[in-house]
Image: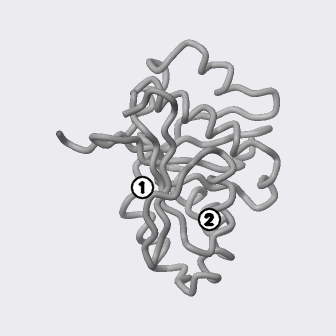
Amino acid sequence: MKWGMMKQNELESCNDDQQALIERPSWHIVPAAAADFDLLADLRHLAMKDNMEANGMFDHELYRQYFKDSFDPASTWKIIENDEVLGFYVLWDKQDHLYLERLYFHPNAQGRGIGAEILTLLKQQAIAHTKPIRLDVLPKSRANPFYLRHGFELIEEREEEKVYEWRGSGLR
């Protein structure tokens, strides 16, 4: 089976309750566009700079090029509040799991509970697709305890990353 991305039109097909999660009182999500690359690359830089430096791997130009090479607006969602982009995420639909490639927030938007609400939305998508969610996190990232708090389990530990998985009840 070919690896694909979680396309934006698939969100609507997951279930009817998702509209309530897509539009919260303080924020909403919208599809990204190709023209959003610079904005999202800058946001990613701000969100990841401390973690990348803590892991001894920050090279802004190399990191930006990697993001450019893998950027696909069709699988990218912006998280908006009052016309300001707070963050974004990228979700891929792989053969046996959903892969959360990115979930980044501007430092000023972190710690407000929006990331937890986004994870609730993604968990609903995983249940609708009957697939677990996997993601990779840098070893010294502040994201490690965040994902553990939200029900993800460490399934593999490599030198350069930790691999987590969330399995809702009834998922294979």
Instruction: Point out the tag, 1 or 2, that comes first from the N-terminus.
Output: 2
Residue 91 occupies quadrant: top left
Q: Which residue is mark 2?
A: 42
Nearer the observer, 24 or 74: 24
Q: Name the side, left or right, on which 24 lies relative to 102.
A: right
Q: Name the side, left or right, on which 16 lies relative to 157.
A: right
Q: Amino acid at mark 1?
A: Phe
Q: Name the side, left or right, on which 81 lies relative to 103.
A: right
Mark 2 neighbour density, 10 Å: few (under 14) some (14–19) many (20 or more): some
Q: Residue at left 49%, top 79%?
A: 61
Disc number at residue 71?
1
Q: Residue at left 41%, top 69%?
A: 66
Q: Residue at left 63%, top 34%?
A: 120
Q: Residue at left 62%, top 55%?
A: 104
Vertical placement of residue 81 versus 163, above or below: above
Secondary structure type for disc 2: helix
Q: Where does the image place residue 127, in percent across and percent down from the top left? A: 47, 27
Q: Where does the image place residue 20, in percent across and percent down from the top left? A: 68, 20
